[in-house]
Image (tube, grey):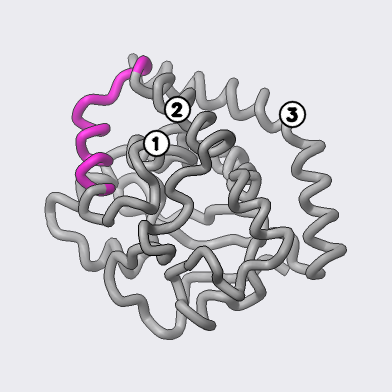
Amino acid sequence: MKHALKRAIDLIASLILLLAVLPVLAIASIAILLSDGRPISFRQERIGQGGRSLTVWKLRTMVVGASNKGLGHTVSHDDARITRVGRFLRASGIDELPQLFNVLAGDMSLVGPRPTLAYQVAQYDAFQRRRLEMKPGITSLAVVSGRNALLWEERIKLDVWYIDHWSLRLDLSILFRTLWKVLITREGLYGPDGVNDMFVAAPKQDEVERDAR
């Protein structure tokens, strides 16, 4: 019953939020197009609930083919691959707004462990795989507890704790804390030394990432 209510809230809230942010998405898309050309959006294959693959959508904030350049999957605060418009979109969280379509489609939830990459999941141990027991979310307990300032080990522990203690009240708390963390303090966008922690060594050629044309 609680999970059905969570889905109902996701469905209603994502629809309302999408209608509210459509002007923001339109302005951001035009800014990307004028400053850096196409593609405007970026899609990436990630792993969600039960180990199933899903396509996650974002507004493009880095140069085309960024995962095969520079630091690969890792990002730093002064990363040359981040475009001028992209730096603002990342700092404000606007780049994540297209994932509301994922929530509407039922692939994601507003709150849940962040969807991760297939090469990372392939190296999970039994405990780490537990973070796949719930739908991935746009935001999570790990996001509001430190985001990229936390090591992956800490983030995964928080994800599993969330799964074990999940409630609608906890979801509401995380959503309100997300607004503060992302829009006001903007904490944890990058790692403590300015470079995001890499879960494991990524493959040199990313076979699951595609730029939307």
User: Counting residues from the N terminus, which is met first, the one under dot 1 or under dot 3?
Assistant: 3
Q: Which residue is mark 1?
A: 144
Q: Residue at x 43, y 19 (%)?
A: 172
User: Counting residues from the N terminus, which is met first, the one under dot 2 or under dot 3?
Assistant: 3
Q: Distance of mark 1 from mark 3, alpha carbons?
A: 25 Å
The residue stretch that appears in magenta: 155-169
Residue 49: image quadrant is top left
From the viewer's side, name the closer residue of 40 and 11: 40
Relative to 211, does residue 108 appear above or below in the rendering? above
Quarter containing the N terminus: top left
Q: Secondary structure at mark 3?
A: helix
Q: Which residue is mark 3?
A: 19
Q: Position of residue 158 (x, y in %)?
A: 24, 40
Q: Residue at x 36, y 65 (%)?
A: 118
Crowdedness near tag 2: few (<14), some (14–19) or many (≥20) residues, C-alpha within 10 Å: some
Is 165 magenta? The answer is yes
In the displayed orientation, state which residue is furthest to the front: 193
Q: Which residue is mark 2?
A: 177
